[in-house]
Image (cartoon, rainbow, N blue to C red):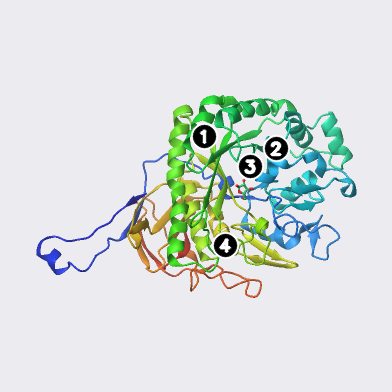
Amino acid sequence: MKKQYSYIRTGILGLLLSTQAIYAQNTVTFRTDAPAQTINRNIYGHFAEHLGHCIYGGFYVGDTSAIPNTNGVRKDVIAALRKMKIPNLRWPGGCFADTYHWKDGIGPKEKRPTIVNTWWGNVTENNSFGTHDFLNMCEELGAEPYLSGNVGSGMVQELADWVQYANFGGKSPMSDLRQQNGRKEPWKVRFWGVGNEAWGCGGNMRPEYYADLYRKFATFMHADWKNDHIFRIASGANSSDYNWTEVLMKNIPRHMLEGIALHHYSFVDWDKKGDAVDFTEQQYFLTMKTALFMDTLIRKHTAIMDKYDPEKKVALVVDEWGGWYNVEGGTNPGFLFQQNTMRDAMIAGATLNIFNNHADRVRMANLAQAINVLQSVILTKDDKMVLTPTYYVMEMYNVHQDATLIPVDIHSNDYTLGNETLPAVSVSASKDNNGVTHISLVNIDANKTQEITLDTKSQTYKTLSGRLLISAKLQDYNSFAQPEKIKPVAFKGATLKNNTINVKLPPFSVVVLELK
Ligand code: AHR
């Protein structure tokens, strides 16, 4: 992203104006020279780990619950996620995945062994939400499942059996077992993670060792189980560990690798994360700095991938991202529950714009996590449900799913705090299958309205409408007492004349424009 920082200070005029900075207008220009590129809907994916109340109490309440449910999954949650157009869901972890043995979660629920969740609060769970529950729930949601396999503490045979159990339509020991457990047709799961954070909770491995292990596991997850479309995702780098990507790209043959992951969280300071709601502008600024760093990360990991895969066959899968703060006071520290404010809406809007603009390499991503954990789209408490500001950003942006990216050149004013600056404005644009153009704009500046002139070049439009997500304070959030404090409203701050759009984007707001 280019920034234009213009002080006009020339000659006499400069002297007259010496105390007053004149900021250039923000400009956005549609590029007409770039190749057509689809924004993969899977960029808008989510993540559900056995962690705190993400699964139990979040998605799943059990079929004997008084809370309305479909096979134990909350009906309110299903309706909200369908409306948001959730394209895929990653499960069962995260760190939990490398402790999970999938055979413990199938068959009669009363006979399933328990598991102690050693990563997250040391709670004992009864495995009542397992493979069938998850994959059937994904069908109900209209989302593609993304299963994260156990490499850290699991065996090759165990993961190969899971692929066979989920995907094989013929007669085999695992498909027989699946049928005994009530599911005749295979689910045909496409997305498979080969371990998670292998550099950390997934086994503390070195990249060379993991690359070899990946080759071994992936060999037995191949298409012999009649799934032509299996998409294997290697456990990827922790943020700026570029060497991890380099070693994996170098050592794993292309025909064994469909995606490589990347994890990057946004925070004030990893050791002093601060409160999710009660934060200063300085803490907000630092959080946005780490969020916008996603653009640099994608560029640098992509440059490494391009060396080994210039045709961009291997996808960069950002399968964990989002804001991470201190857990809410009085809640289990291992459950990672945090509220979700307009700061999170800024992270979501700006990050999704980054992903859209890198749609050639970033073809899948998963916000961490869907319900009651970290940057959630949904919070639940008993029978109540709250949709967070992040939910509304995801819902507003779903117009980009599977649309054609319109690349843009952006010249943004700075958002300045102390001696530091960040680009205030972020933008992405796309044209959908019906020929409708959508432009998503974010102003992260905590104080100033940004005026933007947008040149659509040869594209002309007759009508313009928009939706705006805004609130009085950055620290505002939707609570169980006030669930609808923040929700999108009609946006009246844009005008269209020929092929120029003028937008007045209020401080810390997200807007999606629709042009026909
Ligand atoms: O999302 C929470 C945790 O963060 C995940 O379990 C792990 O993969 C990451 O470190």
Q: CA distance from mark 1 to mark 3?
A: 15 Å
| Amino acid identity at mark 3 | Cys
Q: Secondary structure at mark 3?
A: loop
Residue 178, how many percent across, how many down? 84, 38
Q: Which of pointers 4 and 2 lies earlier in the amino acid sequence?
A: 2
Residue drawn at point x = 79 percent, y = 32 percent:
169
Q: Is residue 68 left or right of residue 418?
A: right
Gap between marks 3 and 2, in whole Å?
11 Å
Q: Is residue 241 above or below residue 320?
A: above
Callout 2 crowding tier (Cα within 10 Å): few <14, some 14–19, many ≥20: many
Residue at image mark 1: 244
Q: CA distance from mark 4 to mark 2?
A: 33 Å
Binning the other alpha carbons within 10 Å of mark 3 as few (below 14), some (14 to 19) or many (20 upward) gives some
Q: Label for residue 392?
A: 4
At label 4, the amino acid type is Tyr
- What is the quadrant of residue 414 in the picture? bottom left
- The reply to whether callout 1 and callout 3 are in contact (CB within 8 Å) is no
Three-letter residue code for mark 2: Asn
Q: Could you tell me which secondary element the residue under label 2 belongs to? A: loop
Q: Position of residue 143 (x, y in %)?
A: 67, 48
Earlier-in-chain disc, 1 versus 3:
3
Residue on which disc 2 sits = 150
Which of pointers 3 and 4 lies earlier in the amino acid sequence?
Answer: 3
| x then y, percent, for residue 494 | 40, 66
* Residue at the disc numbered 3: 201
The residue at 79%/35% (across/down) is 165
Residue 487 picture location, percent across and down: 56, 68
Residue at disc 4, secondary structure: helix
Tag 1: Cα neighbours inside 10 Å, few (<14), some, or many (≥20)?
many
| 287 with respect to 208 (left or right) | left
Amino acid residing under circle 1: Trp
